[in-house]
Amino acid sequence: MTALLSLRGVTKRFGGLVAVNRMDFDVTEHQVLGLIGPNGSGKSTTLNLISGAFPLSAGSISLRGQPITHLQAQDIARRGIARTFQLVRLLPSMTVMENVKAGAVFGHRRHWGHEADAVAEAMLEKVGMGGRGHMTVGQLTYIDTKRVELARVLAGEPRVVLLDEWLAGLNPTELEEGITLIRSLRDEGRTVILVEHVMDAIRSLCDRCVVMAAGTKIAEGTPTEVLSDPAVIRAYLGDDDA
Ligand SMILES: Nc1ncnc2c1ncn2[C@@H]1O[C@H](COP(=O)(O)OP(=O)(O)OP(=O)(O)O)[C@@H](O)[C@H]1O
């Protein structure tokens, strides 16, 4: 299958620290790729490189064979790559509806006026926040801020959705709902890259996984393959415990 998104030799240095070291991987259409690894292994930085938040130190990233390596974050979003953040980023002075509409206006497929309203309503409904568009961000619970952030991302109709620990901190019922929601994104044709520590979610959602440790890819395969790989187990447990 042809790659939708490809990373080749992607490297990010912060001073003397190599946070991401020559990462190579492909994601195809309709795929959920799990990007996993211990804390500090470079997963969020990899998402930041894909979404254009940070410039690459070396390597290249392409979307449908077109280089996006040197594009600004807003241009990458316009091409159809959108992300959520580990620490949810919503505009606190705006209502839920206004936040989601911003996603519709500035996303991949731009919607204006009534059309933006309709898209925002539909996305709020999709994430279980229907009818709550009038609320302010300050009134929301933690899980609801996550839902609204996802609605904002989806309102831009991205082809590739980058989820940075979107399932973290959810209770078991919310987790089930979250997993169902992410699965529905793939079913409607989107490609998802999931940075996640919740292994049940990785097992039930991901077609493939890339495992990082200390900035480097140490394994790639199905969740079952990588989670039984001794190098992966060692990376999670540490050498002393393995
Ligand atoms: N803006 C930055 N400036 C300097 N160092 C950074 C920056 N962002 C990340 N790092 C460092 O890069 C390394 C990789 O961090 P990153 O957040 O990508 O890891 P992660 O795998 O997402 O971790 P976690 O699972 O804990 O979120 C860490 O050593 C981190 O301290």
Image (cartoon, rainbow, N blue to C red):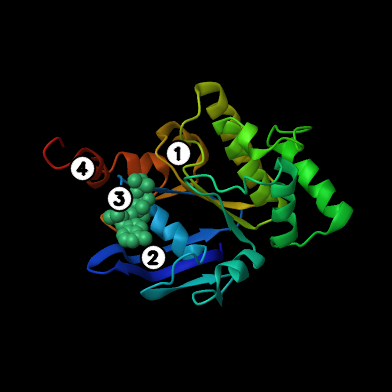
SS of the residue under disc 3: loop
Look at mark 3 in the image and give the residue it sits on: 40
Q: Which residue lies furthest to the right in this view?
A: 114
Whether pointer 2 and pointer 3 mark residues with C-beta atoms closer than 8 Å, the reply is no
Q: How far apart are marks 4 and 1 (CA)?
A: 18 Å
Q: Position of residue 42 (x, y in %)?
A: 34, 55
SS of the residue under disc 4: helix
Q: Quadrant of residue 125?
A: top right
**Viewer-closest of 166 and 1:** 166
Pair 2/3: label in front: 3
Q: Distance between the residues labelled 3 and 4?
A: 15 Å
In primary-sequence order, the first of circles 2 and 3 is 2
Look at mark 2 in the image and give the residue it sits on: 24
Is the shortest distance between ligand 1 and the CB of mark 3 under 8 Å?
A: yes
Look at mark 1 in the image and give the residue it sits on: 202
In primary-sequence order, the first of circles 4 and 1 is 1
Q: How far apart are marks 3 and 1 (CA)?
A: 18 Å
Disc 3 marks which amino acid?
Gly
Q: Is residue 79 above or below residue 88?
A: below
In primary-sequence order, the first of circles 3 and 1 is 3
Mark 4, Cα crowd under 10 Å, few <14 / some 14-19 / many 20+, is: some
Residue at the image position 50 percent from the left and 35 percent from the top: 204
Q: Distance between the residues labelled 2 and 1?
A: 20 Å
Pair 3/4: label in front: 3
Q: In this view, does 37 lie above or below 214?
A: above
Confirm whether residue 55 shows in the render.
yes
Residue at the image position 64 percent from the left and 51 percent from the top: 153
Disc 1 marks which amino acid?
Ile
Look at mark 4 in the image and give the residue it sits on: 234
Q: Where is residue 149 in the image (x, y as percent from the top left)?
A: 61, 45
In primary-sequence order, the first of circles 3 and 4 is 3
Q: Distance between the residues labelled 2 and 3?
A: 18 Å
